Image: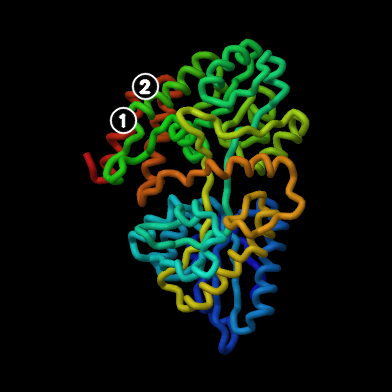
Amino acid sequence: MRKLAAAGLAAALGVVLAGCGSGGSDSGPGKSTVTMWMYPVIGDQAKSQAFWAKVEKDYEAKNAGVDVKIDIQPWESRQEKVTTALAAKKGFDLAVLGPDQIPQFAQQGTIEALDDVVAPAKASFLSGALTALTVDGKLYGVPIYQTITAPLYNKKLFAEAGVTEIPDTLAELKEAAPKLAAKKIAVLDYPGNPKVSLNQSFYPLLWANGGTVFAPDGKSVAFNGPEGVATLQFLLDLKKAGGLPENTASKGNEIEGGALAGGKSAMYHAATALQAPQLGAAIGAENVGVGLPLEGTKRVAFGIAGGLVLAKHSENKDAAKKFAAYVASPEVAAALAKESGFYPARTDARIEGQDEVSKQFAKALEFAFHGDTHPKARQVMAVLATQIQAALVGEKDAKQALDAAAKEANALLGGA
């Protein structure tokens, strides 16, 4: 077993690829090498290192003919590095990707279908997780965890503003805005920086209003329809009423050091369970509340399954599939969930000692939606995020911004 490696943010891509090739010479005679690119799913670096080192050790103890190599990669530039590795046909056998990334590689034919890996325990996996990682009827990702987002709020600020019922709908949020603004508090801690995934800013509001990012045939976008315009106008109305932070167009969604932790905003609508203790440390755990996804015409919470994909170029596909099944097993999935703060992607994984906040976030799992998947979802997101920012700084109105984004996005899609 090679010692677990953590790739630094500054590591050159060529070095990463050269150091992580499938079937390296250090595997030993008669051994199959399985290289897995893992990411900081477990936020604490020391805990992450220890967890994956144990996974390596435990698996190899039961599978003497396999040398597992787990390389912890940074989230930053994940898409680019994976794309380059698959094109170069080297770098990893298995890697963790999300539903919005997998269609691109499935379409390119650079990853393998993995239905046979989950088949023996298919009924135990969350159906939504399997659906999210399926492209054209084939499963391309073995689910190993499930994320979920939900509103996180400061109970004290709402109470001090005379709001006795925490907003449960978009309409109630808008109604509460002036009351908190009178106290110089923004009701919604909206992160408008284009670097923030729209899955944790604009999209949950769009979905709640019944909107979608893409047209049903995927050949054009739909976010500039009535639902999208109403959603962006909702944000602009909140801003006018003092309901968004002053720097909303440029702020990120970090809790620590942000307006929510500083008592300057009252709610973030798409937070993760990992952010709850950060907020508690800043404002007192007794003041932290967790709600269900805000309802428009429906309730929708962004939540994705992290799936292990298998590179088409892998020289040890059978060994890689067996290891993927092990990582997705109820025992490992439960342990990963406990360490990461995410949730298992299967119903037979039991997490012991789950805290109350995690249980509250788990209530949103029934509303989980993995997003509007498309091979060019990331490119479209980048285009739209920039135009939303333009609206938030007052350069365009809601329709102008979304129409401009749609024109550019449709050109990317090859449509109108």
**Residue 169: percent from left, percent from top:** 54, 25
Q: Is residue 221 above or below residue 187?
A: below
Q: Amino acid at mark 1?
A: Ala
| Front residue of this view, candidates 307 and 32 | 307
Pointer 2 with pointer 1, Cβ within 8 A: yes
Residue 91 in the figure: left or right of residue 5 = left
State the image coordinates of residue 393 (x, y, percent, origin top left). Answer: 45, 22
Q: Which residue is drawn at the image coordinates 24% and 45% (left, top)? A: 414
Q: Position of residue 320 (x, y in %)?
A: 52, 73
Q: CA distance from mark 2 to mark 1?
A: 10 Å
Disc with the residue nearer the chain's start (2 vs 1): 2
Q: Which residue is mark 1?
A: 404
Q: Secondary structure at mark 1?
A: helix
* Vertical position of residue 90 compared to residue 300: above or below: below
Q: Is residue 115 above or below residue 369?
A: below
Circle 2 packing at 10 Å, graded few (<14), some (14-19), many (20+), is some
Mark 1, residues whose alpha carbon is within 10 Å: few (<14), some, or many (≥20)? some
> Residue at the spot x=50%, y=31% of the render?
192
Report the residue that reaches farthest toward the bottom: 29
User: Residue 332's quadrant in the figure?
Assistant: bottom right
Q: Secondary structure at mark 2?
A: loop
Residue 56: image location, x then y, percent: 65, 71
Q: Nearer the viewer, residue 10 or 364?
A: 364
The dot on residue 396 is 2
